[in-house]
Image (tube, rainbow, N blue to C red):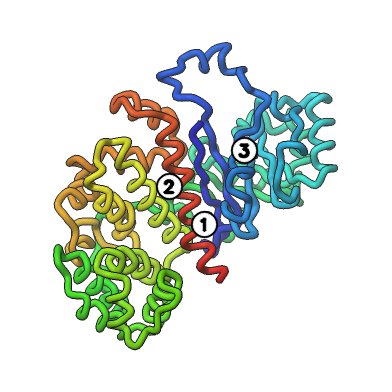
C-alpha cells in the first residue's frame, strides 16, 4: 500500500492540517483493481491504518488529519479503526457518496461521534443536488484547476456560511497570493515547493555562514577543527552540537567545541551538520519546507537498496536534503548548488534530472504528491518492489519523528 501526506496551509503559510492519500495496489501490476477487483477490501480505511502504525502526533502536531472514505468504507466500523481523538479527524468523502437518505443519515451519525466531515471533487452542476450533504460538511475542497473557485466561493459563502472552504491544486505562489484573503480557510497544492527557474536574490549574511559550513563539510576530506570553529560562531548550532554529543556519549565531559566535534567523528559530524545547518538555513521559510527536505533525504537514502545504489546512500540523502535549495535561496538550482559542495551525480539529478540518482528523485517527487499512477509506472519500468518503497517512506516518517519531532519536544 502506498501512503503519503499532503499539507494544507492557512494564508500565513502555517500548516493547519494534513490530508492522507493512499493507494492499495500498483495499478499496472494489478490491473484487476481497475475493474471488479477495486472492491477488494473496499471497506478498509487505509488512512486509519497509517495513523495506528505511526500515532497521530507523529504525523501531525495538533493539526487536523483528513482521512478519505469511499462510498463503501463510509459504512465501516470507523470508531473501531480510528486510534486518534475524533476531533482531530476530518472524514473526507467525494461525489461517489450520493445525496440520498442512506448516506445523509450515515454522515449525521459520524458527526455525532465527534468527527468533522469534508467533501471534494464535486462538479459545479452538482452543487444544488448535493445540498443535503453540503449542509452537513465542515469543509468543502474546491479544485482551483477544474472550476472557477472565485464563483464557487461566493456561492458557498452565501448558502453555507459556516462551511470552511479549501482552495486546492494551487500550483504557484502567484495564484496563492491572488486567493489569499478572499474567503478561503485553507490552501493546498505544490505552490510552496515550486522550483525557482530564474532570479538574482541576494543571500543574507546569516545564510552565507551556513552555506560556508555546508561547503566545508561536503569536501571529500574536511578538517574537524575548521568545522568546529565555524560552528562556534553560531550559538544555536553550538547548543545543538552539545546536545547531540551528550545523547551519543552520555558520560562525556565536553571541554570545547573542538572536543565535541572530535567526539562525534568526521562521518557523524558531517551528517549532523548537513541536517542541522539545513534546518537553520530553511528557518525563515514555511516549516513544511524543512519537513519536506528532511523526509526527501531519508526517503531517498532508504531507496538506495531498492535501486541497487547502496554505495550511494550518503549522496542520495544529500540529494533529498538539498532538493529545495532553490526555493530557500530563491535562485535557480544550478546557482544554488554553486554555493555549496555537492557531487556531480547530485547536481545532475537536481539540475537536469539525469544520471544514476535521477530515477530515485523522480520517484520521490511523484510519491510525495500522491501521483500513484506515475509511481506505479515508474516502479514497473524500473522493476522495483512496491512494498519496499512503501516501507522506505514509512521509515522516513518514523525517522523524522524520532530525530526531529522528539528533539523539538525535548
- Disc ID at residue 171: 2
- Disc ID at residue 409: none
Question: Can I make out residue 354 in this image?
Answer: yes
User: Image check: 94 left or right of 369?
Assistant: right
The foreground one among 20 and 227 is 227
Q: Earlier in the sequence, mark 1 or mark 2?
A: 2
Residue at (51, 38) in percent of width and height: 3
Label 3 to label 1: alpha-carbon separation: 17 Å
Instruction: Look at mark 1 in the image and give the residue it sits on.
Output: 401
Label 1 to label 2: alpha-carbon separation: 28 Å
Query: Foreground mark, 1 or 2?
Result: 1
Q: Earlier in the sequence, mark 3 or mark 1?
A: 3
Instruction: Look at mark 3 in the image and give the residue it sits on.
Output: 49
User: Image check: 110 left or right of 49?
Assistant: right
Q: Earlier in the sequence, mark 3 or mark 2?
A: 3
Q: Residue furthest bottom?
A: 255
Q: Does residue 53 lie above or below 321 as drawn?
A: above
Instruction: Count up the numbered dots.
Output: 3
Question: Can I make out residue 152 in this image?
Answer: no
The foreground one among 154 and 184 is 184
- Dot 1 lies on which element? helix
Query: Which quarter of the figure has residue 242?
Result: bottom left
x, y percent for residue 17 = 60, 53
Q: Does residue 272 lie above or below 364 as drawn?
A: below
Does the CB distance between marks 3 and 1 fall below 8 Å? Answer: no
Amino acid at each position: 500500500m502506498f501512503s503519503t501526506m499532503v499539507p494544507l496551509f492557512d494564508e500565513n503559510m502555517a500548516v493547519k492540517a494534513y490530508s492522507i492519500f493512499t493507494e492499495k495496489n500498483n495499478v499496472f501490476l494489478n490491473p484487476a483493481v481497475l475493474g471488479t477487483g477495486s472492491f477488494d477490501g473496499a471497506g478498509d480505511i487505509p488512512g486509519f491504518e497509517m495513523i495506528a502504525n505511526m500515532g497521530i502526533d507523529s504525523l501531525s502536531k495538533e493539526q487536523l488529519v483528513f482521512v478519505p472514505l469511499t462510498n463503501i468504507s463510509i459504512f465501516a466500523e470507523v470508531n473501531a479503526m480510528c486510534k486518534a481523538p475524533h476531533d482531530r479527524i476530518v472524514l473526507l468523502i467525494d461525489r461517489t457518496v450520493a445525496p440520498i437518505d442512506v448516506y445523509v443519515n450515515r454522515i449525521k451519525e459520524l458527526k455525532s461521534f465527534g468527527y468533522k466531515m469534508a467533501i471534494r471533487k464535486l462538479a459545479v452542476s452538482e452543487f444544488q443536488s448535493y445540498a443535503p450533504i453540503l449542509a452537513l460538511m465542515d469543509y468543502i475542497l474546491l479544485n482551483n484547476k477544474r472550476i472557477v473557485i472565485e464563483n464557487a466561493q461566493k456561492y458557498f459563502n452565501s448558502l453555507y456560511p459556516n462551511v470552511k472552504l479549501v482552495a486546492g491544486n494551487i500550483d504557484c505562489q502567484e495564484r496563492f497570493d491572488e486567493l489569499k484573503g478572499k474567503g478561503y480557510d485553507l490552501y493546498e497544492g505544490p505552490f510552496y515547493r515550486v522550483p525557482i527557474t530564474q532570479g538574482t536574490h541576494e543571500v543574507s549574511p546569516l545564510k552565507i555562514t551556513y552555506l560556508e559550513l555546508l561547503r566545508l563539510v561536503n569536501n571529500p576530506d574536511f578538517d574537524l577543527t575548521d568545522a568546529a570553529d565555524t560552528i562556534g560562531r553560531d550559538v544555536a548550532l553550538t547548543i545543538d552540537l552539545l546536545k547531540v554529543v551528550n545523547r551519543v556519549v552520555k558520560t562525556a565531559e565536553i571541554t570545547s567545541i573542538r572536543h565535541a566535534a572530535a567526539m562525534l567523528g568526521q562521518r557523524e559530524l558531517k551528517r549532523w551538520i548537513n541536517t542541522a545547518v539545513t534546518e537553520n538555513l530553511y528557518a525563515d521559510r514555511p516549516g513544511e519546507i524543512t519537513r519536506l527536505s528532511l523526509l526527501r533525504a531519508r526517503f531517498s537514502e532508504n531507496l538506495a537498496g531498492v535501486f541497487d545504489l547502496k554505495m550511494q546512500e550518503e549522496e542520495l540523502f544529500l540529494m533529498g536534503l538539498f532538493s529545495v535549495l532553490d526555493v530557500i535561496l530563491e535562485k535557480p538550482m544550478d546557482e544554488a548548488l554553486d554555493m555549496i559542495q555537492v557531487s556531480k551525480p547530485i547536481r545532475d539529478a537536481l539540475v537536469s534530472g539525469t544520471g544514476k540518482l535521477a530515477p530515485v528523485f523522480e520517484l520521490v517527487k511523484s510519491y510525495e504528491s500522491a501521483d500513484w499512477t506515475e509511481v506505479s509506472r515508474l516502479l514497473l519500468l524500473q522493476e522495483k518492489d512496491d512494498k519496499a518503497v512503501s516501507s522506505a517512506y514509512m521509515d522516513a516518517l518514523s525517522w523524522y519523528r524520532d530525530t526531529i519531532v522528539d528533539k523539538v519536544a525535548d
